[in-house]
């Protein structure tokens, strides 16, 4: 029987439609998302990369992979949080994002932290 990982992270997401950057008649529709990553485990780890799966209302999928987030690869000690805001243009007024962050622990082991699917939606489009 394996023991639980000493690496535990919580990810919280909030989204916002950016009306001033969007063309509400034909797109693109631009969204901001703010993510807070909190180390709720017992060990320090560094965020290395991100992998996003973005799906629009036509079920067209884009994948985005890259180092760090907003140009940073933060190291989070137990109890520490990191928050950032980024953006996502979509060709449709509704879509979703989900993904994962890859971290490296103090001993060099890599592990993934999932980001559950979240909704990007222009106001008053969904009931």
Image (spheres, rainbow, N blue to C red):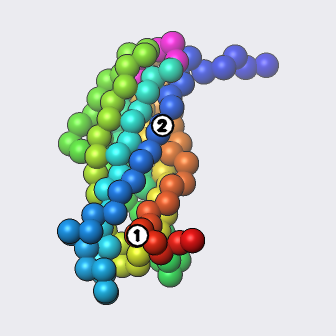
Q: Position of residue 33 (x, y in %)?
A: 35, 52
Q: Which residue corresponds to the image point at 29% horizontal and 29% vertical from the top-left? A: 74
Answer whether residue 48 is magenta in the image.
Answer: no
Q: Identify which residue, 105 or 85, lies in the foreground.
A: 85
Q: Secondary structure at mark 2?
A: strand
Residue picked out by circle 1: 122
Q: Position of residue 99 (x, y in %)?
A: 48, 51
Q: Which residue corresponds to the image point at 30% horizontal and 80% vertical from the top-left? A: 24
Q: Quadrant of the N terminus?
A: top right
The majority secondary structure of the magenta stretch comes to: loop
Segment tinted magenta in the rendering: 41-45
Label 1 Cα crowd, 10 Å radius (few <14 / some 14-19 / many 20+): many
Residue 67 quadrant: top left
| Residue 120 is at least partly visible in this image | yes
- Residues at marks 2 and 1, CA–CA distance in whole angstroms: 23 Å
Label 2 Cα crowd, 10 Å radius (few <14 / some 14-19 / many 20+): some
Residue ranking furthest to the right: 1
Q: Nearer the viewer, mark 2 or mark 1?
A: 1
Answer whether residue 43 is magenta in the image.
Answer: yes
Q: Which residue corresponds to the image point at 34% horizontal and 63% vertical from the top-left? A: 17
Q: Position of residue 6 (x, y in %)?
A: 56, 17
Q: Which residue corresponds to the image point at 38% horizontal and 42% vertical from the top-left? A: 35
Q: Give the numbered dot on residue 11.
A: 2
């Amino acid at each position: 029987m394996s023991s639980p990982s000493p690496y535990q992270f919580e990810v919280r997401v909030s989204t916002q439609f950016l009306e001033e950057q969007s063309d509400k008649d034909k797109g693109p529709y631009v969204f901001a998302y703010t993510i807070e990553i909190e180390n709720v485990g017992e060990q320090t780890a560094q965020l290395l990369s991100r992998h996003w799966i973005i799906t629009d209302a036509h079920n067209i999928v884009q994948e985005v992979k890259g180092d760090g987030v907003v140009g940073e690869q933060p190291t989070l000690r137990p109890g520490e949080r990191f928050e950032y805001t980024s953006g996502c243009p979509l060709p449709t007024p509704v879509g979703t994002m989900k993904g994962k962050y890859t971290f490296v622990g103090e001993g060099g082991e890599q592990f993934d932290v999932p980001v559950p699917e979240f909704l990007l939606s222009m106001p008053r489009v969904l009931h």
